[in-house]
Image (cartoon, rainbow, N blue to C red):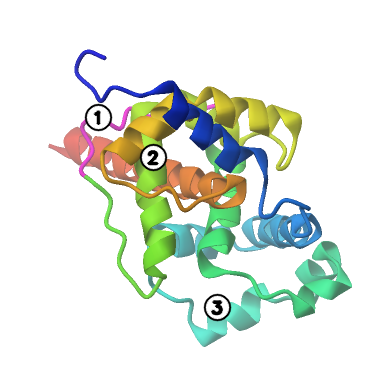
């Protein structure tokens, strides 16, 4: 493959296997993910400013006052009464927020051009494993921004989502060949695509504003 890494058919097939199951083979986490997504949708509707900060300031935990404000009775009722028992993983919740922000702000905008943008930083205290998947997501978004956005805009756990992600298997495999991680599934990869796409879009908008001000 000119200008890239040779990707064996076996490697692409292995990527497809990683994508075919969502969080686990029996998909027991589907209800929890749906609940988290509804909670994220409500948060973006009620507190878009908080959602943007939380996604863009990767690794910075929300303040106590932020947490109290977003855990409103309206969002709890919208997501479902069991959301109180939901232990939302930091990276996945940021991914859910990023997805809702993309739907709200970027779904009809031009696809981003990530080529001139510097590499994103992935600091802690998010886990090393989650940061590794996020770097994988950034690599995929940079290689295929249109496909990445299209995948994020599908319904989660749908056949359309699976088809979109499987079509991107060669790109994912190339990113893994560059030293990224293979410890991912559809849920974590989708979150990584959403967060990376939104953060790169924000970086591009900042760059455009700076150039216009010169």
What range is drawn magenta here? 108-118
Badge 1 crowding class, 10 Å Cα cut-off, few under 14, some 14 to 19, many 20 or more, is few
- Residue 127 position in % (x across, y down): 41, 70
Q: CA distance from mark 1 to mark 2?
A: 11 Å
Element on which disc 1 rests: loop
According to the picture, the residue beneath numbered tag 2 turns out to be 201
Counting other residues with Cα less than 10 Å from the Cα at mark 2, is it few (<14), some (14-19), or many (20 or more)?
Answer: some
The residue pinned by badge 3 equals 66
| The residue positioned farthest toward the top in the image shown | 2
Lower sequence index among marks 3 and 1: 3
Which quadrant of the figure has residue 28?
bottom right
* Alpha carbon distance from label 3 to label 1: 34 Å
Q: Is residue 140 above or below residue 202?
A: above
Residue visible at 86% across and 67% down? 80
Main secondary structure found in the magenta portion? loop
Horizontal and vertical percent position of residue 4: 23, 22
> Reading the chain from its start, which is encountered first: label 3 or label 2?
3
The quadrant of the image that shows the C terminus is top left
């Amino acid at each position: 493959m000119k200008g890239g890494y040779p990707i064996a058919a076996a490697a692409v097939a292995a990527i497809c296997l990683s994508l075919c199951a969502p969080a686990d083979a029996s998909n027991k986490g589907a209800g929890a993910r749906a609940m988290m997504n509804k909670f994220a949708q409500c948060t973006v509707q009620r507190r878009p400013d908080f959602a943007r900060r939380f996604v863009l300031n990767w690794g910075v935990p929300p303040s106590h006052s932020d947490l109290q404000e977003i855990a409103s009775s309206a969002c709890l009722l919208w997501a479902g009464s069991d959301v109180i028992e939901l232990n939302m993983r930091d990276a996945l919740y940021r991914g859910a927020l990023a997805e809702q922000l993309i739907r709200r702000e970027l779904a009809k905008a031009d696809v981003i051009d990530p080529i001139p943008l510097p590499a994103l930083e992935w600091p802690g205290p998010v886990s090393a494993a989650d940061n590794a998947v996020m770097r994988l997501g950034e690599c995929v978004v940079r290689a295929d921004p249109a496909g990445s956005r299209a995948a994020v805009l599908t319904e989660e756990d749908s056949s359309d989502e699976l088809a979109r992600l499987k079509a991107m298997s060669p790109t994912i495999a190339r990113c893994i060949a560059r030293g990224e991680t293979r410890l991912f599934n559809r849920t974590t990869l989708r979150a990584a695509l959403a967060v990376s796409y939104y953060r790169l879009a924000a970086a591009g908008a900042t760059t455009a504003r700076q150039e216009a001000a010169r």
